[in-house]
Image (cartoon, helix red, strand yellow):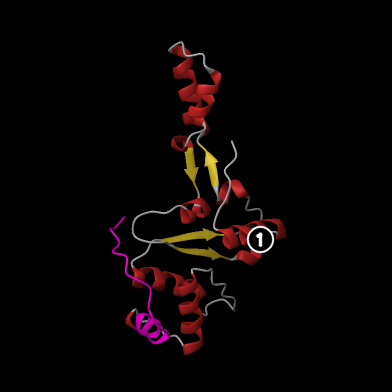
């Protein structure tokens, strides 16, 4: 993965247009305006339209132009929370449990805290997008949202409104 040099968001709508033009993306003022407002307010931007009009490309261009990571969640029918947010690395957890048992460690509560730590958490796109890393906030592309069921759609909307998710044990 290449090192990204994050750049500040545009300060004006005209700077937003210039940013897109500089990345060879043809945009009208209305798109630049909503993009500028989304960046300025640090809020999600929902784009809808026919296939091939450039919705995915704007996310790619924006990530490249701002020097941010692009994280993509490709939606499909049957997509669930564990596939989108996180999973536990069960194999590694089981190995750790067996190693601790073989070493004679019997403190179950300590063992449980250990195997349900971040060390064994497999981050999926949603959790990866929500956790801060150097280089600024990523551009988070949720593609084909309309292919998911209503419950998952509502879950994503809740996450995007609060920018947080709870990871239960």
Residue drawn at (37%, 77%), measured in percent from left and top?
Answer: 10
Image quadrant where residue 160 sits: bottom right
Total tally of numbered discs in the picture: 1
Comparing 58 with 165, the one in front is 165
Q: State the quadrant of the C terminus.
A: top right
Q: Residue 96, how many percent across, how many down?
A: 46, 24
Q: Is residue 52 above or below residue 101?
A: below
Comparing 17 with 48, the one in front is 17
Q: Is residue 54 visible?
A: no
**Few, some or many residues within 10 Å of mark 1 (<14, 14–19, 20+):** some
Q: State the quadrant of the N terminus.
A: bottom left
Q: Is residue 135 above or below residue 50?
A: above
**For residue 48, side relative to residue 56 (left or right):** right
Q: Is residue 167 above or below residue 160?
A: above
**For residue 145, side relative to residue 7 (left or right):** right
The residue that mark 1 highlights is 153
Q: Residue 34, how many percent across, how many down?
A: 51, 80
Q: Residue 25, how many percent across, how many down?
A: 40, 81
**For residue 6, side relative to residue 115 (left or right):** left
Q: Secondary structure at mark 1?
A: helix
Residue drawn at (59%, 76%), measured in percent from left and top?
Answer: 48
Residue that sits furthest to the top in the current view:
104
Query: Magenta segment: does it hold 11?
Result: yes
Residue drawn at (50%, 23%), measured in percent from left and top?
Answer: 111
Comparing 79 with 120, the one in front is 120
Query: Magenta segment: does it hold 43?
Result: no
Q: Residue 80, how many percent across, how many down?
A: 63, 50
Q: What span is colored magenta in the figure?
A: 1-21
Q: Is residue 44 visible?
A: yes
């Amino acid at each position: 993965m290449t090192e990204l040099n994050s750049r500040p968001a545009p300060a004006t709508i005209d700077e937003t247009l210039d940013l897109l033009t500089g990345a060879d993306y043809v945009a009208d003022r209305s798109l630049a305006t909503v993009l500028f407002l989304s960046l300025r307010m640090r809020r999600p931007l929902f784009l809808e339209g026919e296939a091939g009009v450039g919705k995915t490309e704007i996310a790619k261009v924006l990530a490249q132009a701002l020097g941010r990571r692009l994280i993509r969640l490709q939606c499909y029918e049957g997509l669930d929370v564990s596939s989108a947010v996180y999973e536990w690395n069960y194999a590694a957890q089981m190995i750790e449990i067996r190693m601790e048992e073989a070493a004679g460690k019997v403190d179950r509560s300590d063992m449980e805290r250990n195997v349900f730590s971040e060390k064994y958490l497999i981050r999926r796109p949603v959790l990866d997008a929500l956790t801060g890393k150097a280089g600024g906030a990523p551009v988070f592309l949720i593609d084909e949202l309309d292919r998911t069921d209503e419950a998952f759609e509502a879950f994503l909307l809740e996450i995007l409104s609060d920018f947080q998710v709870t990871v239960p044990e």
